[in-house]
Amino acid sequence: MTQTEEMLSELALAAAAAEGRLAAADSLEAVTAAEREVLGRRSVMAEAKKSLGGLDPDRRRDAGRAVNQVRERLEAAAGRARARLAEAARAARYESERLDLTERLNPIRRGRLHLVTQARDRLEDVFVGMGFTVVEGPEVETAWYNFEALNIPEWHPARGEFDTIFVNLGQPEEVMLRSHTSPVQIRTMEARRPPIYVVAPGRTFRADTADATHLPAFSQIEGLVVDRGITMGDLAGTIDEFVKAFFGGEVKSRLRPSYFPFTEPSAEFDISRPDGSWLELGGCGMVHPQVLSNCGIDPEEWQGFAFGFGIDRLAVMRYGLDDIRELVNNDVRFLRQF
Ligand code: PHE
């Protein structure tokens, strides 16, 4: 074997080994190192090139071509290794920046409106369907709106019956959590001229201990009509209509004589239960002339009726609960049924 042949076969061996390392290289540094080893200064390749100088022209051309082919092959192999590493780096970056937008396949549990909210919404719908509009008033009231303007002066025994929760503001017993929605009657008549057809739902408060039929914080809905020629018959008819619309045809209503300082005459109204007994729902009556005057409405020209009843009680009745406290226990297993 001539010296050149020997040198060329050594080159081929070194190139094959370098190609193997390039194919396996796992970093850019490894690629460069493998490349430098065969192609760099003082490499087998550099030695081979140097030795070409001593050959005669014909052999030099053939040997030179062989050396060039080896170089080209190695350069191509290094190029492929670099491309492969760049691709892997890009894939790794995409993976780390990936957002998971996969759709959820397990069903999402939906929340729902509380039983009392559902009852309140339904009541509003029924009354709106009868031509009423919905108004609201504040939950913290003054003695004027909660009592005085409603014909309950300070000395009146009815004040005691309300078990009012007072707020420590102003004069003693001057500011309170409203004990009924009737103050919204006053606010409405102060703000609007008749004819008035409104309902006012909202929360009310009394210093009651919770039991199966009472809650210290409960909800009422107030109704107020002021127009010309309004009679007790309009009141009875309105209550009957609403009960039918809310419960369906089977439930009946009745009025029983009663007393409220702000209505005259006054009544309490009951609804019939499936077992034939009656459930007391609320109070009502013809708006007292003094109350109309308190709001600057002439009782000679205008008459009205008003009613107010508990929304929670209605929900208890409609959904057949046996304890009103179920409404505020916040037991999701209970609430989820409705
Ligand atoms: N506000 C009364 C109560 O809470 C109910 C009522 C309202 C009575 C309207 C008559 C007229 O007991």
Image (tube, rainbow, N blue to C red):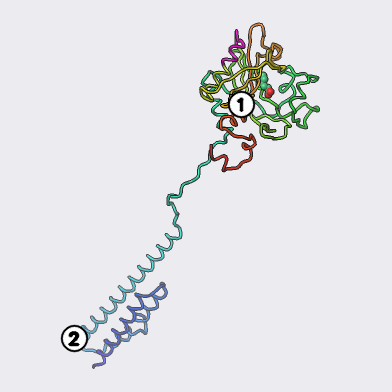
Judge whether residue 182 can be spotted in this image: no
Contact flag, marks 1 and 2 (Cβ < 8 Å): no
Q: Is ligand 1 closer than 8 angstroms to the Cβ of mark 2?
A: no
User: Foreground: 63 or 8?
Assistant: 8
Is 17 on the left or on the right of 314, as rendered?
Answer: left
* Disc 1/disc 2 C-alpha distance (Å): 110 Å
Q: Which residues are magenta?
A: 227-237
The numbered mark at residue 201 is 1
Res 22 quadrant in image:
bottom left
User: Foreground: 230 or 300?
Assistant: 230
Q: Quadrant of the N terminus?
A: bottom left
Mark 1 secondary-structure assignment:
strand
Is 242 on the left or on the right of 103, as rendered?
Answer: right
Res 67 quadrant in image:
bottom left
The numbered mark at residue 58 is 2
Q: Return the x and y of residue 26 as percentages of the image width and height.
A: 40, 73
Amino acid type, label 2 = Asp
Above or below, comparing residue 101 to residue 188 in the picture: below
Q: Return the x and y of residue 172 as percentages of the image width and height.
A: 81, 28
User: Foreground: 47 or 203?
Assistant: 203
Judge whether residue 229 can be spotted in this image: yes
The numbered mark at residue 273 is none
Q: In the image, is residue 278 part of the stretch drawn in magenta?
A: no
Is 19 on the left or on the right of 89, as rendered?
Answer: left
